Image: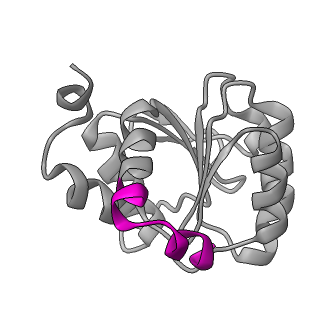
Amino acid sequence: MRGYLLAMTQTDTDARLKHILTTTRVIGLVGLSNNPARASHGVARFLADKGYRVIGVNPGLAGKVMFGETVVATVADLPADTDMVDLFRRSDAVEPIVDAALAALPALKTVWMQLGVENAQARRKAEAKGITVVEDRCPKIDYPRLFGDAPLAALIA
């Protein structure tokens, strides 16, 4: 993915990320931790505080409420209106998760893989279905860089 993003100008990349972050509403965050020191917890909190509906995916936490939503066990358990999955998993574990998301989420528009996470096969499968894919990036870093402290509601008003 780095090569793909490097072929784009920073303006193109930023425009693409702005579009994703202003059109996304429901995020399935795969690998959510209940430990506040973990990155997945901090990113989920940040996104929920900005106004996104963030639903954690973690079989060990399924049924618990975090950030106002009940954590689910699998991607297939996410609501049908989930339009982005944010993946906190090892690169080699991503492909079956993307397969499950493509099969179960009719509103899916974006697969976002966190810092250090890349999977060319998963990217190809998602892009072949018209899904936008982001690899090796973090919305908690990109959102404030692009929008400052603005909440989502202010960006879409």
What residue do we see at 81% from left, 39% from top? 129
Examine the image and state in which quarter residue 93 appears.
Answer: bottom right
Q: Is residue 13 above or below residue 16?
A: below
Quadrant of the drawing holding the C terminus: top left
In the image, the segment drawn in magenta is: 1-14
Considering every residue shown, the one lying at the far top of the view is 157
In magenta stretch: residue 6: yes
Query: Is the stretch drawn in magenta largely helix, strand or loop?
Result: helix
Examine the image and state in which quarter residue 133 appears.
Answer: bottom right
Considering every residue shown, the one lying at the far left of the view is 149
Residue 115, x across and y down, in percent:
51, 75
Residue 31, x across and y down, in percent:
61, 61
Q: Is residue 77 left or right of residue 64?
A: right
What residue do we see at 63% from left, 72% from top? 1
Q: Is residue 114 above or below residue 98?
A: below
Residue 100, x across and y down, in percent:
84, 45
What residue do we see at 69% from left, 22% from top? 80
Q: Is residue 127 left or right of residue 35?
A: right
What residue do we see at 38% from left, 35% from top? 52
